[in-house]
Amino acid sequence: MHTLPSHAMRPLCLNPSLCSSRFPFFSFSIPIFHKFKNNPTIYKKSQKGPPFFSIRCCGSGSVTAKPSWELRRNRAAVQEPDEKVVALRQLFTKPGIGIDAYIIPSQDAHQSEFIAECYMRRAYISGFTGSAGTAIVTKDKAALWTDGRYFLQAEKQLNSSWKLMRAGNFGVPQASEWLTDVLAPGGRVGIDPFLFSYDAAEELKEVISKKNLELVYLYDLNLVDEIWKESRPKPPNKPIRVHDLKYAGIDVVSKLSSLRAELVAAGSSAIVISMLDEVAWLLNLRGSDVPHSPVMYAYLIVEIDAAKLFVDDSKVTSEVMYHLKKAGVELRPYDSILSEIRRLAAEGAHLWLDTSSVNAAIVETYKAACDKYLMNRGSRGKTKNKQYFESDSLPVGPSGVYMQSPVSLAKALKNPSELEGMQNSHLRDAAALAQFWCWLEEEIHKNMKLTEVDLADKLLEFRSKQDGFLDTSFDTISGSGANGAIIHYTPEAESCSVVDPNKLFLLDSGAQYVDGTTDITRTVHFGEPTAREKECFTCVLKGHIALDEAVFPENTPGFVLDAFARSALWKIGLDYRHGTGHGVGAALNVHEGPQSISFRYGNVTPLQKGMIVSNEPGYYEDHAFGIRIETKLVDLSLLSIEEMEWLNSYHSQVWEKVSPLLEGSARQWLWKNTRPITKQ
């Protein structure tokens, strides 16, 4: 899948000795938390956060990414009326609001990629349902920014009231730059501060202030919710479950102890954990609040001698309550997080905040409470509370320690139990895929008419029969012909295509199991592919092999390796509009940081042993086909002897590891498709 942006064959191994044996996972002993090389900074951020919304171009010249058509579909010159946008604008002049523009991002209060339906505000207001994008409504304009993965989808879903801003394309301004162009000096830009990370809000504020525009935090209401009203879905309330220690590998007490050691080393007395997968991983809990991701809506504050989980207690079962009590974790109402932040400041806490992920509402609340504390202390004299300050090493009074969350890297470095669970879940998933492809080939040979949704549903049926299956890890991308070129295409029953056996069919899918998370893509052709299709496919395969076989020094960041996967495509003047690899969570989010393999060279996180990273180059010919990986499509004349050996070795391992899980026709299908291939 392509969202941190994405998966061709299997996760990329980061241990050179094991990569040579084609084994995708590995085990070793590692500490839970790893030391950061940068030192914490008191009072100011240790490094500048990411921009509000920026996507780097991949390059220029003769190599192109086959960008989406610049012209929208033919539409009438008169814009279609949009009642939702009109209603939103009417709120701009209400007392206590007074704004000239309102920004609606994709995120929830935890910067999640996948979010509960009740928080899909950008999708509700714009009609665009892709997972990434930012909508802005002014008094007379409405614009939506998204990246190359979603250009075609956005073209279809936006009505003519909206202008599609193809982020990353030449001449397309960033959202903040656009605001400075369309608003008059003195204009006010409103946001819900819970939906922006502090860094993103600060970046936005800095850019628009250069044109004398003011950023306005609307804490008490979200304007989209105001017009959504009764039709807005209810917040999720399904029960939380304990993630078994045999899959987690490390108990909660040990994880919290390691985290507290990090706090002490950083000169901090407490930390706010707001990323949902970090909360779930740290507490060995899983939920079902968010589609495709086994997490629950919650904040966690860990202090030196206490821990508090802010969550709707109706989701907490007696088993979970006992699990948390053993680890010394108390429960608090989800919506009481800001009052707890104020309490910490009032007691002089040195609060660790990852401003790249913690929302602006929390950080600004803490800063305001710190200012209040210092004012009170100045007027009353020296306070008697010595819980968090007046040591030899820490300044008097509360202060922020702004650094990346230590949980992020600790979670990415999988322990042996997590690696084992990922291996086992991938094997069961592979068996389900083999059963599916066997069934599909038989149906195609019978000339059965099947839609893209039919195929997605059938794959879900095969997966659901596997032990430990919980959910899909993202919406299945089932695209025939031109739909395969829509990088994040999701078929809908009312409008999807019938699968054409004479066109490429792309299937990008994954699953959540109790012990692991999968993400896999295949592209097949049931007839005779064209020479062009085979050439493109083989270049994608060559890129996958090149990345898999790459040997690189320790501490190499992922962007250094990205060119390995693109080189074969570049040689014939092609490219793709997404990253090459993303981290995958262990029975957690299918997209996981902080590591990635991408042309976006701002991410300098080194690739390390224990990380699980996808390897998924692709190619997309707009309005024609999309590719991400199968054997019939290989042009053997384009492969070297070494690449042939790689492919045969891979197929040999697939047969060895997956065939014991199959029987009957599915086993025969696997044998047919994993036999050694040779040049004629």
Image: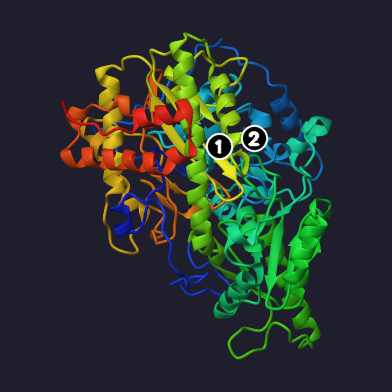
> What is the spatial separation of the Cα atoms under label 1 and label 2, in whole angstroms?
8 Å
Q: Residues within 10 Å of mark 1 (few under 14, many from 20)?
A: many
Please tell me which residue lies in front, 627 or 444: 444
Tell which circle, 1 or 2, labels the residue nearer the N-terminal end: 2
Residue at image location 76% in from the left, 42% down from the top: 236
Residue at image location 46% in from the left, 17% down from the top: 442
Residue 610 image position (x, y, % from top left)? 44, 60
Q: Residues within 10 Å of mark 2 (few under 14, many from 20)?
A: many
Residue at image location 84% in from the left, 32% down from the top: 230
Residue 9 image position (x, y, % from top left)? 39, 39
Kind of residue at disc 1: Gly
- Name the disc covering residue 146, or none: none
- Name the disc covering residue 133, or none: 1
Callouts 1 and 2 close, C-beta under 8 Å = yes
Residue 261 makes an appearance in the image: yes
Kind of residue at disc 2: Arg
Residue 305 image position (x, y, % from top left)? 71, 78
